[in-house]
Image (cartoon, rainbow, N blue to C red):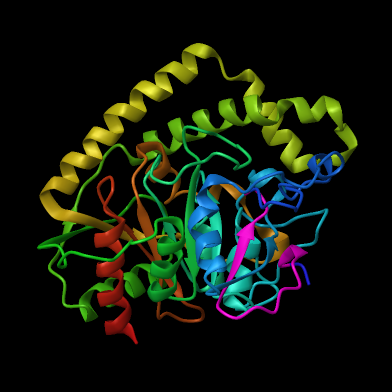
Amino acid sequence: MNELIAETGSVAPGLRLAVKDLIDVEGLPTTAGSASVAASARPASQDAACLAGARRRQAEGGLRLVGKANLHELAFGATGINPWYGTPTNPLDPRLVPGGSSSGSAAVVGAGLADVALGTDTGGSVRIPSACCGTAGLKTTHGRIPLDGVFPLAPSLDTVGPMARDVAGLVEGMRLLEPGFEPSGSPPAVVGRLRRLAQVDPAVEAAVDAALSRAELDVVDVELDGWQDAYAQGGVVILAEAWRSLGHLLEASPGLIGEGTAERIRSGRSVTAGQLGLARQRAASWRAELERLLAEVGVLALPTLAGFPPPLDAAEELALTALTMPVNLAGLPALALPVPARPLPASLQLIGPPGSEEALLALGSVVEAASA
């Protein structure tokens, strides 16, 4: 089974939790889905900070840790294809990519092997596999969930968030990350519908519109000119920071990194300090632009993926992140929610202002119920 890199064998009762193998779990090595990292990995001496709530639930007899979930190698890719540990099976269709980088986390909940999984999202890595596997995922506000004990990719973009089959599962996941968490707030007065940000399959656009209509939300089309520039600047940041986080592995174990991953790491070496500084300046203005728009409409709605998940042998990394990366550059929270479509479920993405996870999940429950 390729969904899990390590299994605990626990048969304890309670909520079944899987943890992406970027997140330290005491007593288990963290491999980052990489043969290079695994070669020298030792069992973690303590849990990552984000697992404190899960451990409290476990001590009370209400949680079972099933294992550490597989991922795209070093979390640096959007397809979820892993040459070292095998590729997790997409529960909708094994011929399709499971999405990355949190591929195992989406696949394990989609297959019913866990109730909740924790993933990380740097350029779309919770939302993309959720969209590919027909499950739900929440990218949290940057900085809301501590990253101590989480293997870094691009620290200024990295976030931890829950993944589950539905919104109720995401709420349980947030309660593990933040004990006492509760969805709250009434649906926003207006939902801003974003379009023409990428070439989107008409069936996906129609599915998103239909889901919003069934929920009887007041939806208006809104314009956002900076999306493509934010996508490009997010790419600059992730490449530069990934080079700093991972570049040493190219020399330490050159034969133990897949060529595609190695190429992406190397490309960050050419990012200059000036280019990175400009990207961070633009990130600040982009965040302000999004927050101004969100002050007018409350929530932004768009697809998570521009199309349906591609076949394993025809996946394009960059195309998969076209509608997710700009959210990471702004540091905002976003919910990916499956909505009915043909031939597979589509995925609706809802973006809110900083710290609005409670309201996003409350809104997600409304949309989900209307589509049931």
Please report the residue visible at 65 percent of the width from the left and 29 percent of the height from the top. 245
Please identify the residue farthest to the front as the structure is shown: 60
Q: Quadrant of residue 91?
A: bottom right
Horizontal arrangement in the rendering, residue 238 relative to residue 175 (left or right): right
Against 118, is 40 above or below?
above
Q: Is residue 125 visible?
A: no
**What residue is at 40 percent from the left and 37 percent from the top?**
329
Front in this rendered view, residue 52 or 23:
52
Q: Is residue 4 magenta?
A: yes
- Nearest the eye: 44 or 218: 44
Q: Which residue is rendered at x = 74% and y = 52% of the image?
A: 27
Q: Total label count? A: 0
Residue 201 in sight in this render: yes
Q: Which residues are magenta?
A: 3-23
Taking 219 as reference, is 272 left or right?
right
Is 148 included in the stretch rendered in magenta? no
Q: Nearer the viewer, residue 297 or 163?
A: 163
